[in-house]
Amino acid sequence: MAKTKELSKDVRDKIVDLHKAGMGYKTIAKQLGEKVTTVGAIIRKWKKHKRTVNLPRPGAPCKISPRGVAMIMRTVRNQPRTTREDLVNDLKAAGTIVTKKTIGNTLRREGLKSCSARKVPLLKKAHIHARLKFANEHLNDSEDNWVKVLWSDETKMELFGINSTRRVWRRRNAAYDPKNTIPTVKHGGGNIMLWGCFSAKGTGQLHRIKGTMDGAMYRQILGENLLPSARALKMGRGWVFQHDNDPKHTAKATKEWLKKKHIKVLEWPSQSPDLNPIENLWRELKVCVAQRQPQNITALEEICMEEWAKIPATVCENLVKTYRKCLTSVIANKGYITKY
């Protein structure tokens, strides 16, 4: 059936006026040359809404039924890596033909959006169990206990590493303006490895690792940096050293060295970088270094040392004070990796 032309507001108002004057539907339709059903519809609309203009329209009806939407959401909830094409095929098998764009619109209306999956350490059942055990055992530790911990870790600093993630504001055709580009070199332009430590009282010493670190080099680093850092930070008696379960850290010779120096070590669950608050300091350091744009390895090392020393003690203190939130998140996430 061909679509009829919509009546103007003047004609609709005239239909209502004639109805108010006592005329019937058929008489009005005959006088104005319109269909009886059209006249009836306009009058009923006026009686209900007290207006003859069009009401706001909801738009085109959804191509996917509520049952289809429920099926899509169930699939995505169980398998977040499902593609839009997979969902199109699922609906097609159920008798509904839609496009990938329609699938995307539906998912957005349901509060979902496509994001890059975060890369996290691979966790086995033993790792998950150890993480939950650690979190539950230390959940109710007092803040004073965490103040006594000297946290440590190693990290890689690339010369042009974090610069690759920067965004710029530019016009449509100015993508290759030098101001809007980031020069890159192969393999990141080189990098350096760093060892560092911190406590609630501030950052300790930062040491550049030259060459490949083995157990002997690690013990040398501890001897030259760990103990001086503990003294400089006034850790006092009973402080606890934290490092992860890297083979160099857990080697028999390293354990004996730590025992000889009367250093108590915090028992640590493997595959748990999110439990170590120093990761937040590494991120802070990398952002600050990138802003200064070092042009060579020597400058990179110098800037790292300067920016590490600039990190306020209040930042370190806050990381330790809020550590319980980290443990709570691990428990809430059933032992899996958290945002911390």
Image (tube, rainbow, N blue to C red):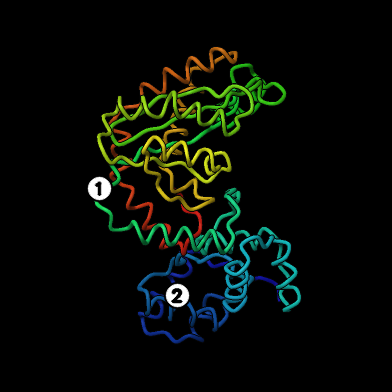
Which is more toward the observer, 51 or 206?
206
Q: Does 278 appear above or below 328? A: above
Q: Which residue matches tag 2?
A: 15
Q: Secondary structure at mark 1?
A: helix
Which is more toward the observer, 189 or 301?
301
Residue at image position (43%, 71%) is 14
Residue at image position (50%, 31%) is 219
What's the amino acid at mark 2?
Ile
Residue 318, x across and y down, in percent:
29, 39
Res 143 label? 1
Of tags 1 and 2, the one toward the viewer is 1
Q: Does 94 appear above or below 114? A: below
Residue at image position (52%, 27%) is 194
Q: How many marks?
A: 2
Badge 1 vs badge 2, beta-carbon distance below 8 Å? no
Q: Residues within 10 Å of mark 1 (few under 14, many from 20)?
A: few
Q: Does 10 appear above or below 216? A: below
Disc nearer the start of the sequence (1/2): 2
Q: Is residue 3 left or right of residue 221?
A: right
Q: Residues within 10 Å of mark 2 (few under 14, many from 20)?
A: many
Which is more toward the observer, 25 or 71?
71
Residue 287, x across and y down, in percent:
47, 28
**Gap in Å between the C-alphas at discs 1 and 2?**
79 Å
Q: Does 92 appear above or below 263? A: below
Res 314 label? none
Residue 198, x across and y down, in percent:
37, 33
Residue 92, x across and y down, in percent:
75, 73
Q: Secondary structure at mark 2?
A: helix
Where the N terminus falls, by quadrant? bottom right
Q: Is residue 201 left or right of residue 178?
A: left
In the figure, residue 278 lies in which quadrant? top left
What's the amino acid at mark 1?
Glu
